[in-house]
Image (cartoon, helix red, strand yellow):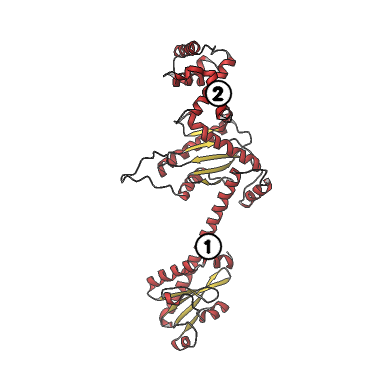
Amino acid sequence: MDGREGSAVLTPELAQEIACDIGRIIGFNVLITDRESVVIGCGDRERLGTVHEASSEVLRTRRAATHSAGQAERLRGVRPGISLPIRVGAEAVGTVCLTGEPEEVHRFGLVVQRQTEILLEEAALLRSRLLHERAVDDFVRDVALYDPEVVDAETVEGRATELGLDVRLARTAVLLDARPAPAARPTAAGAPPPPVSRMSLLRTVREEFHGGQDVAGEIAAGRYAVLHPSPGCPSPAERSALLERCALLVELVRERHGVDARMAVGEPGAGAAGMSGSYRDAAAALRIGPALDPAARVFAAAELRIPRLVASAVRQERIRYTGSVLGAVRERADWPVLRETLIAWGEGGFQLVRTAERLGVHRNTLLYRLEKIERLSGQPVREPATALALYLACLADLLDAPR
């Protein structure tokens, strides 16, 4: 840490806090100056903004100096006591002075000097961490909002390199939505639950995604993104392992923070465009998944390609399509069950055994439902082209259903 960093954190607010706290503990008046010998912290507030002339020599030599009553009278703004340089790195960034008889305060001088330097070093480290966190958040948002017509890919990838990330790696965007639901249960006092601490939740996220090339940041209040290095073409086992990690994280967030979170996993991509595409995949999955399966908490973009394609159509066109394909069948009281059957029929490959297993019903029950749909709609449900049209219409109807 160089002198400029130390000077940046030796603010009047911090100096005043240190002077008052240390002075209260040791029982002596403590005064702190900046590198220009101007008092910026003191238990005696009337001395703030004045010049402590003895500090000029202490700053120049970087050596402590004591001042007797006689010496103090000849110096501007100085009282009997001791003045010590505050060193950060090789540079003196200010002084800390104790008022009192030199012989009496001398024994406290080195302790107060070192304690002040430690506090400044901690403040500098905290500032550095906050700047790093801000850079991480900005990078993650740059990826989320990346537009090649506005920002060069090299600019975004350069920021990744500055954060120590290997831009050659393919990455999968993992989104966490930890915003409390509108109907979140109030506290015992009737007030809404307190907001979740950003840093506290990020620590939980980074526990699960702790690799050296993982980067996690905040996109918006309650929404967090992880850019996780992964193979460009992950195997089914690798996809499953990532989804399991997400399920564990959702459970951790619920246990530690009391939030019923949802997560979504994009498809891997490399470079600024690839990572941004993966983010958009995950964002779409987080938007579409809960509509199709409200009970689920983790969604994979790779499993929602067809629903996403349907959702990309203009809403009015979707409504026209569902109306023309499904007709009056949607007005029946048992339509949710029939719709569930048609969706399972499509996702089960139009096979009786697989569809019955997906629905958890007997094969004869499935046959009864399919015959009923054929009778009501007048369409051959077992004809592949018709079944596919009905499947897409049901997805569109479910996506547009009020929630």
Q: State the residue position of label 1.
A: 124
Label 2: which secondary element = helix
Q: Which label belongs to residue 105?
A: none
How crowded pointer 1 is (Cα within 10 Å; few <14, some 14-19, many 20+) is rated as many
- The answer to whether residue 360 is visible is no
Question: Where does the image place residue 203, in percent across and percent down from the top left?
Answer: 48, 48
How crowded pointer 2 is (Cα within 10 Å; few <14, some 14-19, many 20+) is rated as few
Q: Residue at x 40, y 68 (%)?
A: 21
Measured in 3D between alpha carbons, the distance from the residue under mark 1 to the one under mark 2, in whole angstroms, is 61 Å
Quadrant containing the N terminus in the rendered view: bottom right
Label 1: which secondary element = helix
Amino acid carrying label 2: it is Arg
| Left or right of 63, for residue 17 | left
- Closer to us: mark 1 or mark 2? 2
| Left or right of 306, for residue 111 | left
Q: State the residue position of label 2.
A: 320
Q: Is residue 118 above or below residue 392?
A: below
- The answer to whether residue 296 is visible is yes
Quadrant containing the C terminus in the rendered view: top left
Q: Nearer the viewer, residue 171 or 317?
A: 317
Amino acid carrying label 1: it is Ala
